[in-house]
Image (cartoon, rainbow, N blue to C red):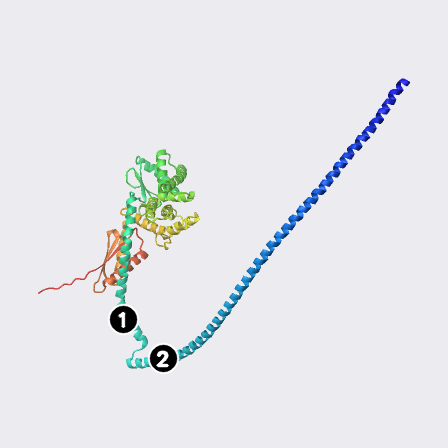
Amino acid sequence: MDRFLMPILTLIVGIFLGLILFYIFTYIRNVKVGNKVTKMIEDAKLEAEKKKRDSLLELKEESHKLKQETDALIKEKKLEIKESEQRLLQREENLDNREKILQKRDENLDEKENNILNKQKELQETEVKMEALLKEEMEKLEKIAKFSKEKAYDMIMKRVEKETAGEMLEYVKEKENEAKLLAREKATAILVESMQRYCEDVASEQTVSTINLPNDEMKGRLIGREGRNIRTIEAVTGVDLIIDDTPEAIVISSFDPYRREIAKITIETLIQDGRIHPGRIEEIYDKVSKDMKTKIMEIGNEAIYKLGITKMDPELISLVGKLHFRTSYGQNALQHSIEVANLCGLMATELGENITLAKRAGLLHDIGKAIDFEVEGSHVEIGVDIAKKYHEDEVVVNAIASHHGDTDAKSTIAVLVHIADTLSAARPGARNDSSENYIKRLTQLEEIGSSFDGVDKAYAMQAGREIRVIVKPEEVDDATSYKIAREMKKKIESEMQYPGTIKITVVRETRAQEEAK
């Protein structure tokens, strides 16, 4: 028992001593921490006091500085206000002086106005008196002369008109010659340069096509039993087949070259195939029509590619291709349009105009001819509608509208298109005409030439490209000859339709003859 008691007592004493030591250590540590905290608080207070003193010093310095700046600003503002007041005072003095001057001027104006009114009254009174005197004198003069004022005026005006008519015609003639001298040289140079740089063969096209047959038996097969094959061909293709005694040949007649070309290819295909009956004719015709649409697009694309034109609507390209199958007085419409486009481009180069736009206007100037046999109206009106439909430039639209003089040209390019169109159509061999139309045109030309007063004889020459008019020298003087030529030009342009241009020459000749006996 005693053996276990001592260790227990020792353990209890040890625990007690440990607790005492723990309490002592804790107390000492707390004292140290407290002293440290107290010191930190005192240091913080000292630091705060120091910062407070520093802040107060800074605040005092800032306040003093701000006060100085404020005082300076107030002083500056006072000076500005004082200067403004001085300026205002000066301005008020100036305004007062100006007001005095204006008041004085108003007084002077009022005085002058009164003087003017008085003088106007005097003048009116004088005018009334003068009118009365003039009227009285005029009445006395009319009584003495037995001639009224109106008759005298008419007589004087007629005399003046008669005396100055010749001078006016001479003046017009002189000015025309001056304008021609100034413009002729430059215009000739541009036109010759353009024509020299562009040269194209002329190939006249007719309204008929001839197809050679392998033998005369093929004629009978094309006609068919009781003519059913030829009737089907004419009904489907819209052309006339002329089968006469000419051996191994038939003729296709149509004024629509597009239909004529389709009919020609259709018949040639039927001849090669050998099977000729109404069903086969319709089948071949449908196939050829589809192929022709593709060919038209190829022709149109080739034309715009040659001219360097881009961004054109496919439907418009198709219409350009259709021009290949259209003729005007035997001239291929597409070749004519390409020629006009090239000439426009060359002249636009010389004049510094837009070359691409000029070529585009030249190519499309006759675009209405592609469908003028399908739509009512002139090819000019149809062409304008087409150009507007496909949103072409206003310059192109005006060029189409004005290339035959139907409207005024609003741009240089429109004038170039008109010139190029005339050049292309008027050059020798470019166009032909039927003998009936040719004789009719010559007769009409001579009738117009003979319709003017003072004309003795009129002769159409150079295949209708020139008319020479001989006037009576005792009735027509030199100045009137120019007047007759100018009026004849206007009448021909308004009443006739003709390819190219017509030159008008008025001849006045005086012969003095005597007979010696």
Judge whether 58 appears above or below 212 on screen: below
Judge whether 164 appears above or below 345 on screen: below
Q: Amino acid at mark 2?
A: Met
- Give the number of marks: 2
Quadrant of the image for the C terminus?
A: bottom left
Helix, strand, or loop for circle 2?
A: helix
Residue at 34 percent across and 37 percent down: it is: 268
- Along the horizontal axis of the image, is 61 left or right of 358? right
- Along the horizontal axis of the image, is 159 left or right of 51? left
- Along the horizontal axis of the image, is 111 left or right of 216? right
Residue 135 image point, x, y percent: 35, 80
Residue at 63 percent across and 50 percent down: it is: 61
Q: Amino acid at mark 1?
A: Arg
Residue 488 image point, x, y percent: 28, 59
Residue 369 image point, x, y percent: 37, 48
Quadrant of the image for the N terminus?
A: top right
- Examine the rendering and report whether any part of residue 426 can be seen: no
The mark nearer the N terminus, 2 or 1, is 2
Residue 490 picture quarter: bottom left
- Examine the rendering and report whether any part of residue 387 can be seen: yes
In this view, the residue farthest toward the left is 517
Tell me the distance, in whole angstroms, between the alpha carbons under discs 2 and 1: 30 Å
Nearer the observer, 279 or 166: 166
Judge whether 147 appears above or below 383 on screen: below
Categorize mark 2 by other alpha carbons within 10 Å: few (<14), some (14-19), many (20+): few
Nearer the observer, 417 or 92: 92
Q: Which residue is mark 1?
A: 159
Residue at 47 percent across and 74 percent down: it is: 107
Residue at 32 percent across and 41 percent down: it is: 209
Which mark, by number, is residue 130?
A: 2
